[in-house]
Image (cartoon, grey):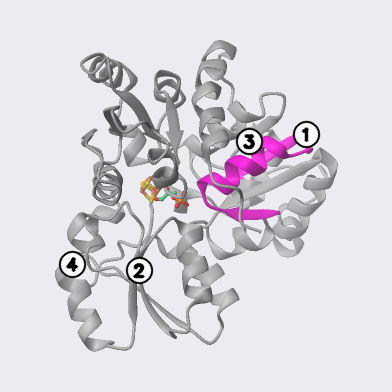
């Protein structure tokens, strides 16, 4: 409970006072100064977290920010593989994050020992791995990709080279179709995006004929086939902002609606439905573990904190740095 926490410089404060006048946003900003910290948040975070963050972005933008920051402490509000990536790219920084349980179903689907055995079956293939994976798996792969640079990177792989893609079979399948490349796919899925239903989206499109449907490439192929635009979170945000269309059905986690609405107050955004037509499936249960209070607490406690073996970080950095070198230039 928040009001059992002892404030570092106000230890004598009573619980009643604490509960009455404690302003978590102000305290986070105060701690940010004290720690020389930067707060990085993914688009799937709650609105209040996005509003207090120094930077909100997709996995690639956040990796770039983490690699370039001059802050001493990175507070990473997203999921754990993102905080780990920040630490690997900025090993000299302290990286803290709000909730240790904020994992990812894609990472969970791909244990390093099984990944290693799978790779060994295809010694002549190049291994591309989605950033939604553990540091151990990144250390075993050739190049990491995100949803915003994957196609660009695949197109740089020599045509005669076979490609292994892990762990998202839907992103991998989408890339194979887009690029015409043969890819061996790891059978992982995102528990959020796999739930979107083509049948229910069709019903919604009939009810809203003026709306455009857009989707993240982690969605199943029948859903992606219906989309007018497929892209990473930042690409979806850019698409709705640049488009003259006023209504969108959005096939991704609805945390992104906050920036979509901020940039487009005159447009309407509808969450894509799941198979029962009415599920709350556009919410990532891992991303939504994070709260402002947990951000405050991780800054007070400097924990949870990412600590990793230096050798593992060096090996994982190799595939991440390849990704950064092969990515398109950042958008202006
Ligand atoms: P983006 O890199 O597109 O933000 O995607 C991250 C993610 O976890 C999607 O589920
Ligand atoms: Fe992982 Fe899916 Fe959540 Fe993204 S939305 S963090 S892929 S479980």
Q: CB atoms at circles 4 and 3 under 8 Å apart?
A: no
Label whose residue precedes the other's in the sequence (2 or 4): 4
Label whose residue precedes the other's in the sequence (4 or 3): 3
Label whose residue precedes the other's in the sequence (1 or 3): 1
Distance CA(mark 3)–CA(mark 2): 33 Å
Mark linked to residue 72 = 1
The image quadrant of residue 138 is top left
Distance CA(mark 1)–CA(mark 3): 11 Å
Tell me which segment is drawn in magenta: 54-77
Question: Circle 3 sits on which residue?
Answer: 96
Q: In this view, does 250 lie above or below 103?
A: below
Distance CA(mark 4)–CA(mark 3): 38 Å
Distance CA(mark 1)–CA(mark 2): 38 Å
Question: Circle 2 sits on which residue?
Answer: 214
Q: Is residue 61 magenta?
A: yes
Q: What element carries label 1?
A: loop
Q: Is residue 95 above or below residue 29?
A: above
Q: Is residue 106 left or right of residue 313?
A: left
């Amino acid at each position: 409970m928040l009001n059992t926490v002892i404030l570092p410089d106000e230890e004598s404060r009573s619980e009643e006072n604490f509960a009455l006048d404690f302003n978590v946003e102000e305290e986070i900003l105060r701690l940010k100064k004290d720690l020389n910290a930067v707060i990085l948040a993914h688009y799937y975070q709650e609105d209040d977290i996005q509003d207090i963050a120094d930077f909100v972005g997709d996995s690639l933008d956040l990796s770039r920010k983490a690699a370039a920051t001059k802050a001493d402490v990175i507070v990473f509000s997203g999921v754990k593989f993102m905080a780990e990536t920040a630490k690997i790219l900025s090993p000299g920084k302290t990286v803290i994050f709000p909730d240790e349980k904020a994992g990812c179903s894609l990472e969970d689907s791909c244990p390093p020992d099984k990944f290693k055995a799978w790779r060994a079956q295809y010694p002549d293939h190049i291994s591309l791995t989605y950033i939604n994976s553990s540091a151990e798996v990144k250390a075993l792969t050739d190049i990491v990709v995100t949803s915003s640079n994957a196609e660009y990177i695949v197109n740089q792989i020599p045509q005669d080279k076979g490609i292994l893609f892990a762990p998202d079979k839907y992103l991998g399948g989408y890339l194979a179709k887009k690029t015409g490349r043969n890819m061996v796919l790891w059978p992982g899925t995102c528990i959020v995006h796999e739930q979107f239903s083509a049948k229910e989206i069709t019903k919604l499109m009939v009810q809203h004929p003026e709306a455009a449907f857009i989707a993240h490439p982690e969605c199943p192929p029948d859903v992606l086939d219906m989309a007018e635009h497929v892209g990473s979170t930042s690409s979806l945000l850019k698409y709705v902002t640049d488009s003259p269309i006023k209504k969108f059905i959005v096939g991704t986690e609805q945390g992104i609606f906050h920036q979509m609405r901020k940039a487009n107050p005159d447009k309407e955004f509808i969450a894509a439905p799941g198979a029962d037509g009415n599920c709350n499936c556009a919410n990532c249960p891992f991303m939504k573990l994070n709260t402002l209070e947990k951000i405050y607490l991780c800054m007070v406690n400097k924990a949870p904190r990412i600590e990793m073996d230096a050798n593992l970080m060096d090996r994982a950095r190799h595939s991440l740095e390849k990704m950064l070198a092969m990515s398109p230039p950042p958008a202006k």
